[in-house]
Structures are given as structure tokens and as C-alpha cells.
Amino acid sequence: MRPYVVLRYNGFILLLNACFLLISSAISAFHEDSALFPLLYSAIVVALFGVFPLIYTPPAQEISNEEGLLIVVTSWLLSCLSGVIPYVLWGGEFTFTNAWFESVSGFTTTGSTVLTDIEALPLGLLFWRSATHWIGGIGIIIFALSLLPSMGKAGMLLYRSEMSPLAADNFRFRTKKTLKVLVVVYVGLTILETIALLICGMGLFDAVTHAFATIATGGFSPKTLNVAYFNSVSIEVVIMIFMVLSGMHFGLLFGAVCGDWKSLWKSSVARSYMLMMAIGVLITTISLRGGVYKNWPDALRYASFQLISLGTSTGFANADSALWPSLSVLVIIFFTLQCACAGSTSGGIKVDRFVLFWEALKIRIARIKHPHMVVTAKQNGAPVEAGVLEESVLYIVLYVAIIFFTSLLLTALGVDGLTAFTGSAATMGNAGPGFGTVSSLGNFSSIPAPGKWALSANMLIGRLEIFSILVLIKIRSWK
């Protein structure tokens, strides 16, 4: 293990954050708001800490697997810490605990907030808050690698450490080409949504910040009432379309843009994702019709927006789902756990693992009936290794276990059961709101400080997909 290698690559990440802090301070200066000094000071401090490792440590083209994993995890932690600085310097509702929670929620694209009055923040700080989504949405390491010159094998190893192993199936390019595909789709979707929201009547600032949050499947809005503030069907439709697209594998989207539309339909994961989303919207609409909304159009409008938002781990809200019937709540909780596809900006267990879980279940049933039968699981027509099936099932078990133990901790701190469970599930899945006091138009301000730290840990564990953290815990055994 070479600490200087880890420090050097962390330096690149800090410089990336410093650039966005500088852009945010420029916005603050333009509007002459109170966040100028906190943002500018933060940009200088973060830039200095980023420059020093690049000056005093030698470059390294070759890094080990352990070093690559440590670079990825520490980059996320340092980015979250850099995001705390402007919040704490500005003050307001931001204690250190609240600032840490908000920063982690931003970078992990969770979208949960502790703020009770979001409009009280100056525009520069609101832009930084949304920018943390956009930086973290595509993955901090992937973002940095796409902007840096070729790093050879080091870049490839960092990319593999950051990207979910389930996402590799539909990326059949070399590492550098894959990075370009990711960035082209990510930036392209952001620009397209910004233009569409402008056409629908949003102002430029709101359009950009909502596009940042949508494409990153984050959910931070510069409005306390979130998307419900606009009360616009056209805006909601645009956001829904881009939430669905952002929840799909970016490799498949890139292929479709290049003319390979059949790849979307051929993908069993993409088909499952769209079909399950449609079924969820249908059930929720029927559940809301009559009891909550008097007509079908309203029931469909709010059901589809809320379910797609949570089902893609975005977390936007156009209604207070805390008032909805139990059936709707349970359906939304399921989609909060599942979320969208690997290779997207979505969090959660992901549709891919549910498809593999179903394959594993079919194999187990077949072997009970015919013990000597040789059965191979398949996904998209290709065989799936037994180790991949085992890892997917284990991931689901660990995922649910972490939610359970976090819920226990929150209830021990005096949080009610519904809030504890759904808040734990929402933060673990990087989905944003839950139910109870942390519902779609609520916030996490009432959670005790130890609970906020536990939920922040959930966000990071969910974003790094558990196994990276487990390996990091055994760092002392690395050789």
C-alpha cells in the first residue's frame, strides 16, 4: 500500500470539487448574495488541499486493486467533507451534523434534506447543493477520469472500482470509450431536460438545478415544496420522462441513440424495469382513485410522478404521499427498495439483481424437482456464472439487513417505526423521502443527531454498493 498514490488521486477529485465551488461563488457574486465568502473560501481551501498532493507526490501509472478501492472510497468521503465547508461557514440551519447529512445526501444523489426552509438559502449555495448531485450522479471517479488525460491501467482499475459490476454487461467498449459514452449521455440528457423545462416555463436557474437533480436521480429542488411548487403538468411530464431515461443503463441509451433501438427491447433488465414500473403506476393509480383523488386523471398524474420518482431513486415530489392509503405506500416502499437499472445513476438494489434473484429461484425449484439436472441461468441470452447469482442474492440479504439494523437504531433513539424503516430504506437506496415525518414534502430535521450520522452512513454504503465498504473494513489485512 502506497499512501502517496491514494493522496495524489484524491487531489484530482478535490480540484474537481473546487471548480464547482468556484462556479457557485461566481453565481453568488453575480446575485450579490450572502454565500459569496463561504463558497469562495471553500473553493480556495479545497483547491489548496487538492494541489499539494499533485506537487509533492510522484505520478503513478500502475496502482494495485487495494489502492484503487481505497482511492474510490476516500474520494467519496473527501468530496462529502468538502461539501460541508460552505454550509457550515454560511450557518443558518447548518450545524456540522446537518451540513454533513446534506452534503452526503447531495453527493450520493439521495436527495434527503434536513432543511425546513430551502428558499432561505442564497442562490449560490443552492447551486452548489444541486451541483453536488451532478458531480456524484455519474460517479466522482468516473467524472474525474473523463476529464483527465489517459492514465493507462490506473484509469481502467479506478473505473472498475467505481462502476457497479452489474453495469459492465452493456458496455462493450474500452474503458476510455465507455467513459466518453457515460459523459455524452449524462451531459446530453442534462442539456435536453434543461431546454425542455425552459420551454415549459421554468426560469433558467430552476431549469438547470432541476435537470442536475433529475439526471443524477437525486431529488434536490431549490423549492421547499419541491416540484409541487410549480403545479404544472407539463413540467411534471418532462421530469418523469427524464427520470425514466436516467434510470436506464446508459450503454443501452447510447446504443439506441446510435440506431440500435432493438437492444433496449432485447435487454431482459430493461423490459423488466419498464413493465414493473407500469404495473406499479397502475396499482397506485387504482389505489388513489376515489379515496384521495376524485377523478382518474389526477390519480394517474400523482401516482405516476411519485412512483417513478421513488422507483428511479430520484425523490422529487408533486404531492404529500404521507396521506396516501396503505396499498400505495407499500407499492412505493417496494420500488424504493428495488429502484432502477445498473449502469444508470439510480441507487437501490437495482432491477438487475431482482432479475438474477428470480433466475436463482427458478434454478433452485428445478433442482428440487430434478436433483441431477444441470441448469444454467441466463440474462439477455448469455449464461450467468454461479458466482454472480450468489453475489446478487447475498447483496439483497445484506442490503435488507442493513436497513433492518438502522431501523432498530432509529427506533431506539425515539423515532416512530414507519419513519425509521422508510427513512432507512430511502437513504440506503439513495431515494430521498420515506414516509411518516420524512415523507415526500417533509424532511429529516426531526431525526436525532446520531440517527442522522447513521443515515448518512447508509447513503454512502448504498452508493458504494456495500462490498466496497466491507473490503475497506479489512484494510489491516491487506498486504
Image (cartoon, rainbow, N blue to C red):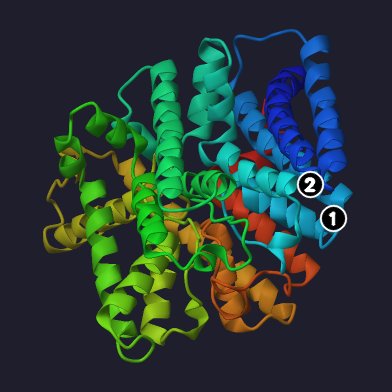
Q: Are marks 2 and 1 in contact (CB under 8 Å)?
A: yes
In this view, 83 is above or below 18:
below
Q: Disc 2 designates what residue?
A: 84
User: As rendered, which of 397 and 464 lies closer to the eye?
Assistant: 464
Q: Amino acid at mark 2?
A: Val
Q: Amino acid at mark 1?
A: Phe
Q: Disc 1 designates what residue?
A: 96
* Residue shown at the point (43%, 57%) measured from the top left: 396
User: As rendered, which of 322 and 336 lies closer to the eye?
Assistant: 322
Identify the image quadrant of the N terminus: top right
Picture quadrant where residue 78 is located = top right
In this view, 248 is above or below 8:
below
User: As rendered, which of 428 and 313 lies closer to the eye?
Assistant: 313
Identify the image quadrant of the C terminus: top right
In the displayed structure, does residue 74 sit left or right of residue 187? right
Q: Where residue 386 sits in the image (x, y, percent)?
A: 30, 43
In this view, 373 is above or below 399:
above
CA distance separating discs 2 and 1: 7 Å
* Residue shown at the point (35%, 91%) measured from the top left: 291
* Residue shown at the point (53%, 33%) measured from the top left: 162
Picture quadrant where residue 111 is located = bottom right
In this view, 357 is above or below 374:
below
Can residue 436 be seen in the rendering of this structure? Answer: yes
Question: Element at badge 1?
Answer: helix
Q: Which mark is residue 408?
A: none
